[in-house]
Each structure stands twice: as C-alpha cells, then as structure tokens.
Amino acid sequence: MSLTTALLKPGEADRLVAGHPWVYSNSIARLTGPANDGDVVQVKDHRQRFIGVGFYNSRSKIAVRILDRERTDFDAGFFRERIAAALALRRRHLPEATSFRVVNAESDFLSGLIVDKYEDVLVVQTSSLGMDKRKHLIVRVLQDLFHPTAIVERNDMASRKFEGLHESNEVLHGQVPDHFTVRLNGLTFSVPAGGGHKTGLYLDQQANYAAVATLTKGTEVLDCFSYLGGFALHCAKAGAKNVTALDQSEDAVNAAREIAKVNGVTTGLSYETANVFDWLREKTATGPSERLIPRYDVIILDPPSFTRNRAAVEGALRGYKEIHLRALKLLKTGGILATFCCSHHVDARLFEDIIVAAATDAHVLLRRTRTFSQSPDHPIIPAIPETEYLKGFAYEVVR
C-alpha cells in the first residue's frame, strides 16, 4: 500500500526504534504527501529507514502513534489479533480474575485504546483520533471475543480535547443497568454505569488489595482516600479488628457502606466522609503540653494523583509529605504504613525520598517490608516509561 511518510529530524529516531510509539509533532521534519487527521502514515528516520506505521493527527502534540513495526492494514483482523494477545496475557497472570483491564493502550501496543472488563460488561475508552475513528471495528471484535451483555463508551477524559475529540458516553452494545456487579478477589462490588473514578473501579490495585489485607489480621486499620472501600473491605474480610475508612465523597462513602453489607461486613468497618488532609491534621493536633498517642497498627494511603503535569510536581510533593507526616504520627511502633502514588511524574525513588523526609520530621525510623506495583493487567514496558505509573511500599515503624 502507498502511504504518506512522516520523515523525522536527525536524532529523533532512537527512542522510537527502542520501542516508544509516540512521534511528537516537533520531531517531524516534513510529510511527503497529504495526510488527513486519523489516517495511517508510515514513519521513517532522516535517512529514509523505515520505523513503523501508525495514526496521524495534526492537531495533537503526538502527531503519530505507531501501532506496528511492519506495514499493516488496521482492519478487524489486526484488532482481533492484538486484543486476543492482550487477553491471553491476562489469563496467564490473573487466571482467577473475572474483572480486569483487557487492553492497556501502549502496554498492549494499541496506543489510544483502553478496554476494561467488569464481569460481562466491557468499558471502552479511545483517547486518540485514529483509534476513535475505528471504534466500530473494535466493538465488533469485542463482541466476537467476549460476547458481553453490554459495551459502554466512557470517553470523558480531559486528554481527548488534545486530539480534537469531544466527550462521549454512550452504550455501544446491549443494555446497561444503573449499576453492575463486579468480583475482585472473591469480594463483590457495585459499580455505577458511567460514573465513579476511571472506568468505575481501580482495577490496577486488584493484586495490592489482597496483598495489603494479609498484613492486617487483628489490627486497627485506617484507610485514607478509600473511594468504594477496596482496601478497607479486603482488610475487614481478612480479619482486621477494626477498620476506619475515609473519603471526601459522600456518594462514594454511601456506596461503600452498601458494598460492605452485600459482602456480609456489618461490624468492625466504619466509613467517614472527610477531607483526609483536614482529618489527619485534626487528629494530630496537640496542645503545648499534650503528647500524641498513636492508635493505628496499619495505615493505608492511596490518594488520587496530585499531579496532572510536570508543573504540578512541586506542589504534589508537598501534599505527599504532609499526609505521610501526619499518618506516621498516628502509627504505633511496629505498625505498618502501606502507601501508594499513581502519578507517572513522581517516580519510585522520588516518592520514597518524600516518605523518608516525612519520617525524619515525625521522628520515626522506617523499615521497608514490601514493594508494590500495578496489577499484571496493567503491564509495564520499560521502553515506554508512561506505562509505569503506580508504585507503592509497605514500611514498618522500627522506632
């Protein structure tokens, strides 16, 4: 097939040859012919050496998203092969899971496409113009591979506007109830159709919910930024003596209470609607001659991302340090801090540096006991740093 070529400037090919799929607009020297937004183009370096083919968009800073290293027709057969390969990966690494991320964009070599499976309902996000224009092919493939009762489009991400796309929330196939039931690690959650965070639940924490819960038997637990109670409910079911869960959304707190009842947890788990920063500040406030008595054996910090871009990192680090400093003051000696950061712009080393600084100010010494990452249905490609965003640690307070 004859394709328009995006010729790169000298020095711009190395990152792409190593596997990164994004060709930035300022990396392109010129196009060899016309190309409409959403069209397939081929990418070559400044010496005319072929690199790959992908979707073009003149309106985006990411001018080309490379999808294949060979000249390929992006038809239903292509999407079937890629999505089937992504599904096989999940079956290998999460064999018992019935709800998981099927396609994780760049991690599965389908830049601009996310597909989440919530039992027999699929939720689709298309964050690039080229992928959005082929949504009908993707839906057809998903119907054939999964036979879902419904496919929902959840395209309300701010990133779509950078591709010249509008928000769109539609039912693409079947009928969707107001809420649908999801199973995670043997627990049942109710997800609002078209509402909630991300596509409904934090599937990237699925493995971590179970891992952290194993640390909490017989303990007093504080779960901050609880949302629908993923960590809190897992801890309660694992035998925690008492769990206090905090979230600033009253709707989320009310939903979490109902979810706890559905799972038979009626005692030992309490939810509060609160701004976590204000709550921690209030609980750690002392008078001139007062001594703060730590009361928790386990504290979980799983805040939403404080950083949407690199310019926000400095403020985010202040926020991370604040919540860790306050939390550590409430944690008993020998207690466990399980803490997470979901910002790509704050790497694991920087995140731990902030935690250590907070520990120093709180006059405690920490021993790291666990390292956490995103669940296996959110694969990490080291050549594509953006695929690694969730990091976490468990620390024991030594003194």
Image: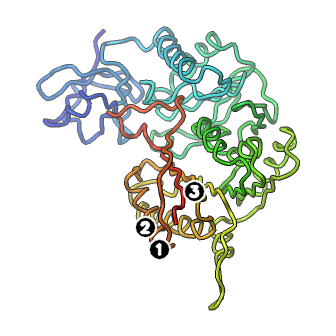
- The label number, if any, that marks residue 261 in the structure image: none
Q: Left or right: where does residue 278 sit relative to residue 362?
A: right
| Residue denoted by label 1 | 361
x, y (%) of residue 249? 73, 57
Q: Secondary structure at mark 3?
A: strand
Q: Residue at x 25, y 29 (%)?
A: 18
Q: The disc labelled 3 sits on which kind of residue?
A: Leu
x, y (%) of residue 254? 82, 52
Q: Secondary structure at mark 1?
A: helix
x, y (%) of residue 83? 52, 17
The single residue placed furthest to the left in the displayed view is 47
x, y (%) of residue 256? 79, 48
Q: Where on the picture, by quarter, is residue 278? A: bottom right
**Inter-mark Cα distance, 1 to 3:** 16 Å
Q: Left or right: where does residue 197 sit relative to residue 176?
A: left
In the image, 393 versus 12, the foreground residue is 393
In the image, 371 versus 365, the foreground residue is 365
Q: The disc labelled 2 sits on which kind of residue?
A: Ala
Q: In the image, is residue 314 above or below residue 264?
A: below
- Using a 10 Å C-alpha cutoff, classify the residue at mark 2 as few (fewer than 14 neighbours), some (14 to 19) or many (20 or more): some
| Residue denoted by label 2 | 357
Q: How is the image coloured?
A: rainbow
**Inter-mark Cα distance, 1 to 2:** 6 Å
| Residue denoted by label 3 | 337
